[in-house]
Amino acid sequence: MKNQGLLRNGFGMVMRNKRYLFWFWLLNLTLAEFATAAFRRSAHAILDHSLYADRLVHGFDAGVLFDLLAKLDVGQMNSMTMPAGYFAFLFFLFTAIFLPGVFAGYASTYRLPREDFFRACGRNLWRFIRIVIIAGIVMGIFAGALFAANGAIVKKATESTNEVLPFGLRITGLATIFLIITTLRIWFDLAEADTVLNDAHAVRKSIASGFRHTFRSVGRLLSSYVLSTLVAAIFLLGGLWIWMKFVAPESIIGAFMIAQITLFLLLIPRFWQRGIAVSYSQQRMLIPVVAMQPAEAIPVAVPPAPVAPAPEPVPAVSGSPSPLEEPH
Amino acid sequence: MTIRWKLIAVLALVVVGVAALVNRKTVTAAPQATTPVKTKASISTSRAGLSIPDTTLAINSPTPMSQRVVHYDIDAKYDTTKHTIDATEVLTYHNLTGQALDHFPFHLYQNAFQPNATWVRETKMQGSRDTGYEKWDPKQYGSEQIKSFEVVGQGDVTNNIQYVAPDDGNKDDKTVVDVKLRKPIPPNAFVQFKVAFHDQMPETQARSGWKRDFLLGGQWFPKVGVWWHGAWNCHQYHNTTEFFADFGVYDVKLTVPQNEVIGASGVEVSSANNSDGTKTVTYHGDDIHDFAWTVSPRFKVKETTYQSQMGPIKLRFLMQPAHWGQVDRHEKITRETLDRFEKWYGPYPYKTLTVVDPEPDSAAGGMEYPTFITGDTSWFMPDGLHGVELVVEHEFGHQYWYGMVATNEFEDAWMDEGINSYTEVKVLDSILGKSTSMMNLLGATFGEREGQRDEYITVADKDPMAQNAYAYYNYNSYGGITYGKTASVLLTLEGIIGEETMATAMHTYFMKYRFTHPTKEDFLKTIEEVSGKDLRWYFSQAVYGSQVLDYQILSADSYPTNWFEEKKDQKKGKNKDKDNVYQSHVTVGRKGDFVMPIDIEVKFDNGEKVLEHWDGQSRWTRFSYVKKAKVVSAEIDPHHTVRIDRDNFNNSFVVEPNRKPTYKLSTYWLFFTQWVSQAIAWWAI
């Protein structure tokens, strides 16, 4: 399968299931609303009746912001960052819970009913938790080692008289780390897709399968993931640029709208990557199961669902070879 | 032709011979010299022939500008591999104390960089701007070792010197040494010391030392203390203190490898290559109280001239190659700062100013020495970030507040750093704009006066300004009080005595006390004299005290005087706002313990403004009005002249809440929180 096919199929899945983007964006916004409530409450008490606060509205006087943060009533920065951290974790948790449903929805050739969505979520919850833990350990080890190595190289480079060299090495190192961690992400994305699509009980098999396929098609998959990440960067930078360029400093609604549109768009590339994983999984990772059928002598219980055409409308995963097939 | 050349050769020999003879005592001819150079040996000469030169080679003045107490003649050789300096120092001291002196204390600053030295101990306890000494690195070691010490006419006294620790009694601190003389030096007599010393320079700390192939030679030679107010003033080196020294003349020979580019205090007199691959560059400084220098083989140099009120100044910029694109920024801010200082405070009399862009990632940035300053930048410095301008302006300002008005930095740090921070606000305001002098980038702005205030308010109740620089609660308090509070206190003073009066007072103070060592009272009394006001109530709290100023509007409200008739009138539809008479109250409170008269502006919904005045003595006061208008807002200090109020938010009260600022900030914070959540989820699942 060509790279463009992967990208197109993955993007098609995202576009056919735009409701998932909306729900995740709403979840993200709702949790962030809770996360920022304490700050908002403190800020209302201090700013609402103060003329001094007006300097924040027309332009952005960083001195006023510093004054606000220095006030004892507002407290330390961690009183703001801690709730944000907790709710960020909650968003991650909810993502882990609902993601199997998203994979099932992407794999489905029709609009997945709500009960099937949640069934896929429930059925794969524990599997996903295991994958997330293993992924966390693997990526943590890699990231820790890579960042440590990068730090050591940069530190060594600071002995050089070339001032730009440490920065250059840091950026190069970060780019390398990005590529390696993205490769690991592909591995576990494929494992997640495999778990859902094959209804695999044994997570280790999905992880092993994901590992094999990642490195078998690393060029195609990595380039697809990098491209979608670049799209995310463009969304972010473009959104910020429009925000600064076209939104008047005193326009709260304008700022809110452009911020939320940017955040909504930022969800697309990651869901696109998941679509790519599902598409690849459908194309490549289901084939070995079919190919294994002749070897019936091996007493391996092969789940029937992915290989046999599923009777309507039950399956969460279609056995259809064409992910581009229009929904029924 | 032959005879002509012989004549010229003879004449040249005579000239060189005369110059060599003169140079034995005084430095004379130099290419930069544009004013008459005195060749007479001294103003007053001792019977032993000792004197302090009255040269004017390095200043745009025909006569000396300071009372010269010392003459340092140093011959130093720097080993770029070992980062060591071996030198001989001949110090001639003029006893102007009015009494016989039988001992002399000397600073050995480089000994501060040793594990048990007071400087390192304090840094470990309080923190510093460069290093916390979590782990001792041998590269951080510095030392200043006296190899021999001779008092001319009294013989070698090397065995008579002992380390003393006048501030904390730390026996391991070797930053001050006391030299006992065999015979006292009578009043008005001269004494000469010949010292051989060896420095091990540390990797840059406290704006001194080496980094890679760069060296900043600051506080590198044994320096005699100052006889001040009837006693020797020679403090140990602390992590929050700077320096204090007498004015005089410096003649310094620096021997370094030939590939090195040198910059130093004073004017360059000569440069000669030696046969061993080194070169010796000679510098001369007049009316200065310290001498610093720098070398790096990679400096790129720009030289230009500034025409000052007293004559031309040679501006020399020593830039890092990666920062060469910023040399014009350095030059521009230097010129504009010089312009403001000369117009507002007084002339810059020196013939040179060297601006050094130090090695990146070194602790050498942002330092002042006479006619020699270091900036601080990096290869990425957008125009909207005014880091270059801020540092260069600040360090240049020290040419006035430290360089010429040479206050005691050990005891009155606010008088150099603080007054300099105040003038920094004034100068940068005028050059870069009040609200954008620190930053004007991507729609966000930050003004220097806000920066100074912000530095202060976080440590507002920790320390007074008037205390020894090494007695602060911690490093942050030292910084917040000496820099931020002083600047804010003086800006507030402008509001009390008037901006023009304050400007006159600053000019008067500079002209009266340049080339002297004024005390805090000299400064405060100058302001009182110029303003004609008794300001003790202010100084006692702001300078000598740690009181915190925080006034607030406790409430502002209005109600109709016929409130009891309201329901009935409403039913009849007669109750129109414009016909109503309102009872309004504005209550103002004093939250802090700093007492100061304040103005309050009360605005009504008919556009009327009422300016109230309150002496602030009691804890609160209330202003009441009966008008055909409701109060809209009340604001303390409506002209925003009080810069030391700890909380600006409670200085005003708007009756109808304006929720826009909160919504705006919340939108930003919301966006950031959502984005972080998404980023975590991106990688983790």
Image (cartoon, rainbow, N blue to C red):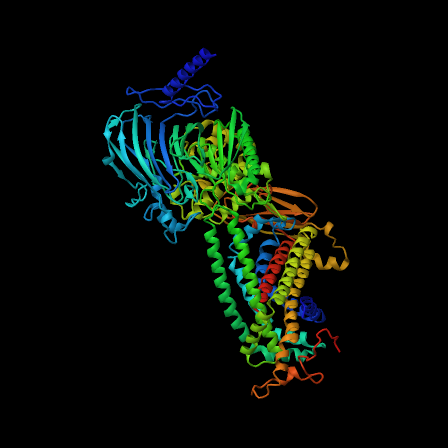
Q: Could you say which quadrant of the image residue A256 lies in?
A: bottom right
Q: Position of residue A294 (x, y in %)?
A: 62, 85
The answer to which of B226 and B321 lies nearer the viewer is B321
Residue B409 in view in this figure? yes
| Residue B48 percent across, percent down from the top left | 28, 21
Q: Seen from this angle, which residue lies furthest front?
A: B2
Residues B453 and A81: in front is A81
Residue shown at 48%/63% (left/top)?
A: A144
Look at the picture and state if B615 lies above or below A168: above
Question: Could one spot residue B587 in this view of the protein?
Answer: no
The outermost residue toward the top is B3
Looking at the picture, tell me which residue is in the foreground, A230 or A246. Answer: A230
Front one among B546 and A6: A6
Locate the C terminus of chain B and report the quarter of the image it occupies.
Answer: bottom right
Residue at horizontal 67 percent and vertical 56 percent from the top = A238
Where is residue B193 shown, x and y percent of the image?
29, 29
Left or right: residue A286 versus residue A77 is right
| Tally of numbered tags | 0
Where residue A58 sits: x, y (%)?
Answer: 65, 49
**A4 relative position to B341: left or right:** right
Quadrant hosting residue A2: bottom right
